[in-house]
């Protein structure tokens, strides 16, 4: 069976790209599959074939449209095309980035009136919305892989897709690689963090979208709590200034991109991700597998796995008071011996890479039938 997977680029810190890498590595091991990646740019492509499609760059809209047009011309040579980009004509679409219209609605919440107006008339956003509509209504589309029920229900509501076209396959995680044993990789000594201090970790790029300001503000009410911020953001200096203004700069560590994210998980006691919109971040399942409870928002697909007060807390992305209150509950639970590590680990254990691969393979067999 000739299977093509379509994703434009590889960013080693990108959650969607890491999902594609994991899927490719797992699927390429299946002798019944001939797997090809169609991409504009990809690092460390080993174990599968790669077709490079890289039209000249003029602007964001032209780059998206040029890649889509060139990639679509390759689709007829494959039995199944699984696209991670909004390209009409694919057999399967994985909605790993969610619904663009929903993302724009959530992002509007933090924009000024002028920026909201500008966004509404952006040629790039208009193109993505149109491509999304055309893709979901294209006759070639057989299945949509959703990485959360949040995304599944949103697609059904907005585009009227029948339930048999929508399937939820959660992100898999290597439960041996991501394990509570990461405590052995703690950076506390190197970062001068007291061994008994409660530490929250934020992992990801897009500091504005994923709530770094909320995380920093939330710990200001808890003088014993430290915050690690791992990831790259061009506006990182703005958030460093916020930490200084709130008087928590000595307890907030900006780590930048981290080569081995397990060092961050091994240093922390919980993950905080007050994101405006995130269909299902890999960092959440990785953190849970390492025994870290979650602080996240209803706009995050991982909220579906949270059992309030046992393995995490869910508050609105902009609800600083709510996160402060949730952190207080977490600190109280730690004092009375709640085993958040065991609860978090138990949540993640069923969602292995093998399970994800088996669910994908079952979906492909269903499509071919």
Image (cartoon, grey):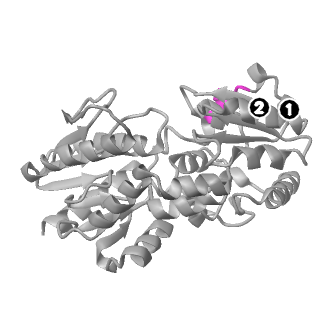
First to last magenta residue range? 182-187
Q: In the depicted view, which residue is nearer to us: 151 or 58? A: 58
Q: Is mark 1 on a helix, strand or loop?
A: helix
Instruction: Name the spot of residue 169 as percent of width and height, x first.
Output: 39, 61
Secondary structure that dominates the magenta span: helix
Q: What element carries label 2?
A: helix
Q: Name the residue under label 2.
A: 240
Relative vertical location of residue 304 with respect to residue 193 in this rendering, above or below = below
Relative vertical location of residue 256 with respect to residue 223 in this rendering, above or below = above
Q: Which residue is drawn at 48% across and 58% down?
A: 350
Q: Residues within 10 Å of mark 1 (few under 14, many from 20)?
A: few
Instruction: Name the spot of residue 221 as percent of width and height, x first.
Output: 91, 48
- Whether residue 184 is in magenta: the answer is yes
Q: How crowded is mark 2: few (under 14 residues within 10 Å), some or many (20 or more)?
A: some
Where residue 244 sits, quadrant-wise, is top right
- Whether residue 333 is in magenta: the answer is no
For residue 65, side relative to residue 368 (left or right): right
Q: Which residue is drawn at 61% across and 59% down?
A: 108
Q: Mark 1 points at which residue?
A: 244
Quadrant where the C terminus is found in the figure: bottom left
Residue 28 numbered tag: none
Which residue of the protein is positioned furthest toward the top in this rendering? 190
């Amino acid at each position: 069976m000739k299977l093509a997977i379509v994703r434009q680029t590889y960013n080693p810190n990108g959650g969607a790209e890491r999902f594609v890498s994991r899927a490719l590595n797992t699927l390429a091991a299946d002798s019944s599959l001939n797997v090809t990646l169609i991409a504009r740019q990809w690092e460390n492509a080993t174990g599968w074939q790669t077709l490079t499609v890289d039209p000249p760059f003029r602007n964001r809209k032209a780059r998206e449209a040029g890649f889509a047009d060139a990639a679509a011309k390759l689709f007829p040579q494959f039995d199944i095309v699984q696209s991670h980009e909004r390209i009409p004509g694919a057999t399967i679409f994985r909605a790993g980035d969610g619904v663009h219209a929903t993302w724009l609605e959530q992002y509007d919440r933090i924009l000024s009136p002028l920026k909201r107006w500008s966004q509404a008339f952006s040629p790039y956003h208009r193109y993505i919305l149109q491509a999304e509509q055309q893709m979901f209504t294209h006759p070639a589309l057989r299945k949509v892989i959703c990485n959360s029920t949040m995304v599944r229900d949103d697609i059904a509501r907005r585009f009227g897709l029948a339930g048999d076209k929508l399937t939820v396959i959660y992100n898999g995680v290597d439960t041996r690689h991501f394990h509570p044993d990461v405590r052995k990789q703690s950076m506390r000594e190197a970062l001068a963090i007291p061994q008994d201090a409660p530490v929250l970790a934020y992992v990801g790029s897009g500091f504005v979208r994923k709530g770094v300001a909320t995380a920093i503000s939330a710990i200001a009410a808890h003088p014993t709590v430290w915050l690690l911020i791992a990831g790259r953001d061009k506006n990182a200096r703005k958030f460093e200034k916020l930490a200084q203004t709130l008087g928590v700069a000595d307890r907030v560590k900006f780590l930048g991109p981290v080569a081995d994210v397990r060092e961050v998980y091994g240093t922390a006691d919980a993950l905080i991700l007050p994101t405006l919109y995130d269909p299902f971040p890999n960092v959440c399942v990785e953190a849970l597998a390492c025994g870290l409870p979650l602080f996240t928002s209803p706009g995050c697909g991982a909220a579906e796995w949270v059992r309030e007060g046992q393995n995490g807390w869910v508050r609105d992305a902009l609800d600083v008071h709510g996160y402060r209150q949730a952190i207080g509950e977490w600190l109280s639970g730690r004092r009375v011996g709640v085993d958040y590590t065991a609860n978090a680990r138990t949540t993640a254990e069923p969602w292995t890479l093998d399970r994800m691969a088996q669910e994908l393979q079952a979906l492909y067999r269903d499509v071919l039938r």
